[in-house]
Image: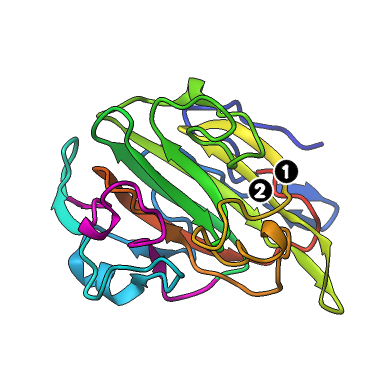
Amino acid sequence: MMSYMPKTGNLFRAFLPVALGVATFTQTIAQVGVGTKPAKGAEVLFDGSRKMLDEKWTYWQGPRLAATLPIKWQIEKDPAGPGTVVNTNDPAAAGGKYGSADIVTKETFRDFRLHIEFYISKPGGNSGVYLQNRYEIQVLDGDTTSHGLAAIINETPSPYYAYNGVGKWNAYDILFRAARFKDGKRTEPAMVTMYFNGKKVHKNHKISQVWGGPNSGIDGGNDGGKGITDTPGGLKLQAEGHDVLYRNIWIQKQDIKEANTDF
């Protein structure tokens, strides 16, 4: 019979070798929250360095692009910890022109586990984390609606209760399964489970479409955002002309066979 360890801090499952006849298996670790280190086999997408920013990221070539390389997001001292971070406040995005200076990873992804930490410096700070450069997880201080902080934008309520607040680091831990297709037609929508600062806030949510139009991300201009295509996409971060910072970004590729992202 399997036994479980109690929840301790942000460690939700521990390695537990279990004997079943002659076979054994091991549960996986799901460690979440601010400061979580990369999982085994994960790729670090941003370590605080200018070198990694330039090597692994570029501007998204969307219809509203107004910025030019090199990336104008600035590397700054972490205001609440050691090390350095990146500030999204690109001059080309002044006035909240999303899509004008968003950055995206050069590598593209299908299924994945993602960890990312953000810091909103001032009230009303606005950015966004785009899974596959399609589906936005909102980063917006002060908004508790379905367009608000930590919402799968326009699809779930904002779990604002889990927010650490302005001037503090916050973390999203996400397990994402891409949409599935057969003969070019979508047979299963994308699905996501997400922890916000160690609290599970979305479980196996099916994402219906891309919101925000063609300036938002891949497929945003296809059939009003409902025309999802079978194309992998990068992780995208949004510039909205605000001092929103990011650090400790890592991704672990997955191959999720069944429509279940709970972890």
Q: Locate residue 211, reporting x and y percent.
A: 60, 51
Name the disc covering residue 192, or none: 2
Range shown magenta: 84-108
Q: Is residue 37 left or right of residue 149?
A: left
Tell me which amino acid carries mark 2.
Val
Q: Locate residue 195, reporting x and y percent.
A: 55, 37
Mark 2 Cα shell of 10 Å, populated few (<14), some (14-19), many (≥20): many
Q: Locate residue 191, reporting x and y percent.
A: 71, 51
- Using the image as rendered, state which of residue 46 and residue 69 is in the foreground: 69
Residue at 56% over, 44% down: 30
| Residue contact between numbered discs 1 and 2, judged by CB atoms under 8 Å | yes
**Residue 91 counted in the magenta span:** yes
Name the disc covering residue 204, or none: 1
Residue at 82% over, 58% down: 22
Tell me which amino acid carries mark 1.
Asn
The quadrant the C terminus occupies is top right
